[in-house]
Amino acid sequence: MKPRDLFPRVLRHTFASRYLRTHPGDLRGLAAILGHSNLNTVLIYTEPTVEELADKMEQAEVS
């Protein structure tokens, strides 16, 4: 990623996604850290990426 591509929302989204990877299911903690009072606001960070979905499909084919 180039410095010109870094915006506050990109950094915030990256942090939130990584936080949930290391603390699965801790939406309340993430909401508190990000300053959200509504858990629905942090649900956007639980949306799987295309890469994550592809990995899950590959794992399902192997099983």
Image (tube, rainbow, N blue to C red):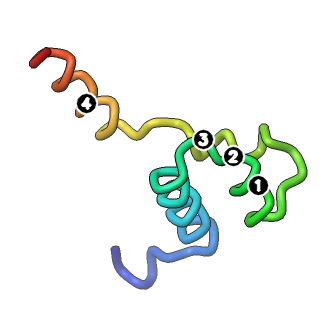
- Spot the residue most to the left: 62
Cβ–Cβ below 8 Å for labels 2 and 3? Answer: yes
Q: Point out which mark residue 31 bears.
A: 1
Residue 47 in the image: x percent, y percent?
53, 36
Rendered residue at 33%/30% (across/down): 53
Q: CA distance from mark 2 to mark 4?
A: 24 Å
Secondary element under disc 3, as helix, strand or loop, is loop
Q: CA distance from mark 1 to mark 2?
A: 6 Å
The quadrant of the image that shows the C terminus is top left
Which residue is under mark 4? 54
Q: CA distance from mark 1 to mark 4?
A: 28 Å
Residue 21 in the image: x percent, y percent?
46, 51
Which residue is under mark 3? 25
Q: Is residue 40 left or right of residue 11?
A: right
Which kind of residue does numbered mark 4 sit on? Ala
Cβ–Cβ below 8 Å for labels 1 and 2? Answer: yes
The quadrant of the image that shows the N terminus is bottom left
Quadrant of residue 56 within the rendered picture: top left
Which residue is under mark 2? 27
Viewer-side label of 2, 4: 2
Residue 60 in the image: x percent, y percent?
21, 17
Viewer-side label of 1, 4: 1
